[in-house]
Image: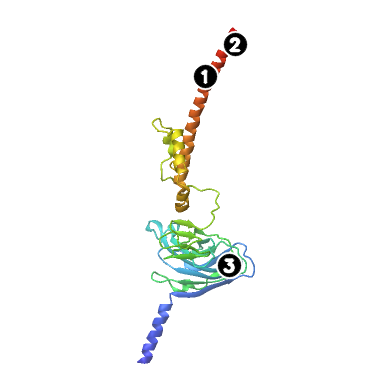
């Protein structure tokens, strides 16, 4: 009886393990591929026949990176037509990388079989291909006889597999940086108090800031009450800074809101423009008065 139970246990273990296919194909090259790396499977490109999880693990010597790619997809047909191969397609293919190697990878159909093409020409690369598949119509023979070759893609229904990785909780990065669980990113700090906190210098070609305050074109409206220069002078004497501009102590304590400060500075430039226009008008009036006085003087001198 014990022997009978042992046989049943071994049989069950064998059946349970049948859907795990380890080291189906191994690849190594002591050189550089000409076209890329093509994994030729024996998986038929038939709709609703397979939902495999394929893993590629190894070492990419050229870039000194670990290879750890996981590929999933489902074969299906548009319109539910399972008899017309022109309608067959790879449904929701996805790939994640647990290593640092993330090349472009494609799925394609060649001669009715699924192929995986790694569009990379790294030298001295090594990896092994394994798979897990269960629950549809997969059979063990589909996971045998896979080969890895240096060939160009020649198939149809080709799609590039999009990468997708998701992290839970805090993701710590080198240099004392973090992407925390609430979505804040800290560069040079592990305690970001905003969506992006940088403890250091930012070097950028361009920065675009969305406005959270109105642009100050209202300064040019007819009903805008522009302070007189005397009022501005009195304010500066009393406060040692311009109206609507924080004091030096406030800057040191609270920093600068770039969007608000830019709009405030633009407002001051527009006000300066109004002052300059008014000053120009006053200057022109004075010039006319001077010209008239000069004419009178000339007339008086000519009458002598």
Residue at the spot of label 3: 149
Q: Which quarter of the figure has residue 245? A: top left
> Where's the C terminus, which quadrant?
top right
Residue at the spot of label 1: 289
Task: Report how far apart the C-alphas of labels 1 and 2 lie in the structure.
Answer: 18 Å
Q: Residue furthest right?
A: 31
Vertical relation: 160 (above or below) 20:
above
Looking at the image, can residue 263 be seen? no
Neighbour tally class for label 1: few under 14, some 14-19, many 20 plus, Cα within 10 Å: few
Mark sitting earlier along the chain (1/2): 1
The front one of 250 and 59 is: 250
- Which dot, 2 or 3, sits closer to the camera? 2
- Which dot, 1 or 2, sits closer to the camera? 2
Vertical relation: 57 (above or below) 158:
below
Q: Position of residue 176 (x, y in %)?
A: 51, 64
Q: Secondary structure at mark 1?
A: helix
Residue at the spot of label 2: 301
Q: Secondary structure at mark 3?
A: strand
Q: Residue furthest left?
A: 1
| CB within 8 Å, label 1 to label 2 | no
């Amino acid at each position: 009886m014990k022997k009978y139970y042992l046989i049943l246990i071994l049989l069950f273990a064998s059946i349970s393990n049948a859907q795990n296919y380890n080291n189906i194909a191994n690849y190594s090259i002591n050189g550089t591929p000409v076209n890329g790396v093509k994994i030729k499977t024996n998986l038929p490109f038939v709709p609703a026949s397979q939902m495999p999880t394929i893993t590629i693990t190894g070492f990419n010597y050229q870039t000194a990176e670990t290879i750890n790619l996981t590929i999933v997809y489902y074969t299906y047909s548009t319109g539910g037509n399972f008899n017309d191969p022109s309608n067959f397609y790879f449904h929701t293919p996805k790939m994640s990388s647990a290593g640092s190697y993330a090349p472009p990878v494609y799925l394609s159909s060649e001669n009715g079989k699924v192929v995986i093409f790694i569009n990379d020409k790294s030298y001295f690369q090594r990896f092994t291909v394994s798979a897990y598949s269960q629950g549809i119509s997969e059979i063990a023979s589909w996971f045998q006889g896979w080969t890895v070759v240096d060939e160009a893609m020649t198939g149809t229904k080709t799609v590039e597999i999009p990468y997708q990785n998701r992290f839970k909780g805090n993701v710590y990065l080198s240099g004392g940086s973090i992407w925390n669980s609430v979505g804040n990113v800290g560069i040079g700090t592990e305690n970001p108090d905003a969506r992006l906190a940088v403890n250091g210098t930012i070097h950028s070609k361009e920065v675009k800031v969305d406005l959270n305050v109105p642009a100050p074109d209202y300064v040019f409206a007819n009903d805008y009450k522009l302070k007189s220069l005397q009022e501005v002078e009195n304010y500066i004497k009393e406060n040692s800074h311009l109206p609507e501009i924080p004091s030096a102590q406030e800057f040191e304590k609270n920093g600068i809101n770039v969007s608000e400060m830019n709009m405030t500075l633009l407002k001051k430039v527009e006000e300066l423009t109004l002052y300059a226009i008014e000053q120009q008008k006053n200057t022109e009036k004075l010039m006319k008065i001077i010209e008239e006085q000069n004419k009178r003087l000339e007339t008086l001198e000519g009458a002598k």
